[in-house]
Image: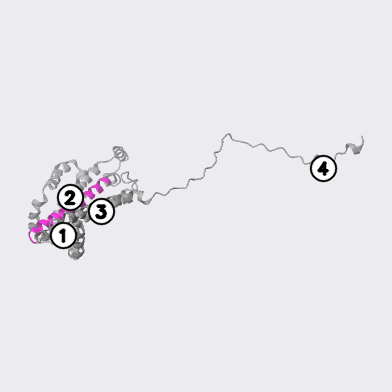
């Protein structure tokens, strides 16, 4: 064989590609990655917390505008129904007098509220320890609630020589029952399964009280506080009315009485406005305290922003 014809030049064959490596599959198809959608920010007007503040404020502004328009259009004299602008002017003119009276009423209210908390919780703990004690004493707690404070306030003011102490006692009697009733109900409203678990593990009465009953009673307790704060303010005002009728007193109720005697109706409305605002602020403060304590674990306060 001729070597010239048998010789094959490798350059004439070109480049030989290697066969492709087979791809191993696991049998699962991977879905294509989706781009995350941009998060849409909620408008601040749509936030629940903003709506809870703005909606009542808008209603108040509408009512004040209607009130102002009615007084102006009907030409109602100020000694009958003063206009909102006249009341606002009175608040500015008598600022020192009204704020001093407000501080007196607020001091009595806060002292009565704290006293009702301490006494109410102590009585509730006593009731929980024994059904016999609760059965024997609970009717007297109800008796304090249903007795009109106007009927017994003059006696308390006569018996107690210190004016501030007598007013605090009157307001405490008004604000006491909600704390007793709600705290007692909360201490007894325990999950039976958890109570059986504590009993199975031979927990002492103190351990059951601290680790089970008190946490279960907190929502009821704070609900009672919100009611008690408003009642303490009402009791303080009523007691000041009784004391003011006798010629003593410097609180807002006394200013209302004096304004009525002098036919200074704008000042009377200004004092009523301060009492109302004080009650609302007390309720809001206790609602925020409730959310701060219970918001992290109790369903009644979760999801509220």
Cβ–Cβ below 8 Å for labels 1 and 4? no
Q: CA distance from mark 1 to mark 4?
A: 113 Å
Closer to the chain start, of discs 1 and 3, is: 3
Asked if residue 142 is positioned above or below residue 153 in the image, the reply reads above
The count of marks equals 4
Closer to the chain start, of discs 1 and 4, is: 4
Q: Nearer the viewer, mark 3 or mark 2?
A: 3
Counting from the top left corner in percent of width and height, residue 254 is at 12, 59
Q: Would you call the spot at circle 1 few (<14 residues within 10 Å), some (14-19), or many (20 or more)?
A: many
Chosen colour scheme:
one colour
Segment tinted magenta in the rendering: 219-247
Closer to the chain start, of discs 3 and 4, is: 4
The residue singled out by tag 1 in the image is 266
Q: Nearer the viewer, mark 1 or mark 4?
A: 1
Q: Is residue 48 visible?
A: yes
Q: Which mark is residue 61?
A: 3
Q: Quadrant of the N terminus?
A: top right
Counting from the top left corner in percent of width and height, residue 62 is at 25, 52
Along the horizontal axis of the image, is 265 left or right of 46?
left
Tag 1, which secondary structure? helix
The residue singled out by tag 2 in the image is 176
Which residue occupies 16% across, 53% down?
A: 234
Q: Nearer the viewer, mark 4 or mark 2?
A: 4
Q: CA distance from mark 3 to mark 2?
A: 35 Å
Closer to the chain start, of discs 3 and 2, is: 3
The residue singled out by tag 4 in the image is 11
Q: CA distance from mark 1 to mark 2?
A: 34 Å
Along the horizontal axis of the image, is 108 left or right of 191?
left
Q: Nearer the viewer, mark 1 or mark 2?
A: 1
Res. 192 image quadrant: top left
Q: Nearer the viewer, mark 3 or mark 4?
A: 3
């Amino acid at each position: 064989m001729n070597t010239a014809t048998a010789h094959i030049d490798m350059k004439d064959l070109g480049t030989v590609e290697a066969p492709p490596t087979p791809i191993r599959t696991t049998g699962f198809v991977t879905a294509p990655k989706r781009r995350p959608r941009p998060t849409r920010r909620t408008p601040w007007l749509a936030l629940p917390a903003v709506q809870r503040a703005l909606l009542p404020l808008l209603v108040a502004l509408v009512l004040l505008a209607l009130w102002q328009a009615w007084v102006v259009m009907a030409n109602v004299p100020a000694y009958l129904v003063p206009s909102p602008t006249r009341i606002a002017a009175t608040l500015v003119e008598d600022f020192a007098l009204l704020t001093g009276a407000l501080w007196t009423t607020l001091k009595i209210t806060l002292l009565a509220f704290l006293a009702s908390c301490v006494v109410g919780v102590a009585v509730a703990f006593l009731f929980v320890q024994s059904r016999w004690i609760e059965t024997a004493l609970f009717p007297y707690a109800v008796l304090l609630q249903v007795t009109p404070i106007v009927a017994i306030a003059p006696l308390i003011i006569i018996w107690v020589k210190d004016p501030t102490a007598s007013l605090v006692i009157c307001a405490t009697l008004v604000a006491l029952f909600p704390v007793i009733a709600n705290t007692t109900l909360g201490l007894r409203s325990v999950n039976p399964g958890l109570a059986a678990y504590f009993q199975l593990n031979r927990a002492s009465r103190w351990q059951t009280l601290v680790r089970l009953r008190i946490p279960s009673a907190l929502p009821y307790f704070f609900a009672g506080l919100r009611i008690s704060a408003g009642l303490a303010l009402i009791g303080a005002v009523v007691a000041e009315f009784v004391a003011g009728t006798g010629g003593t007193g410097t609180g807002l109720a006394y200013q209302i009485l004096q304004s009525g005697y002098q036919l200074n109706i704008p000042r009377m409305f200004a004092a009523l406005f301060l009492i109302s605002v004080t009650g609302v602020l007390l309720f809001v403060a206790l609602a925020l305290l409730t959310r701060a304590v219970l918001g992290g674990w109790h369903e009644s306060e979760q999801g509220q922003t």
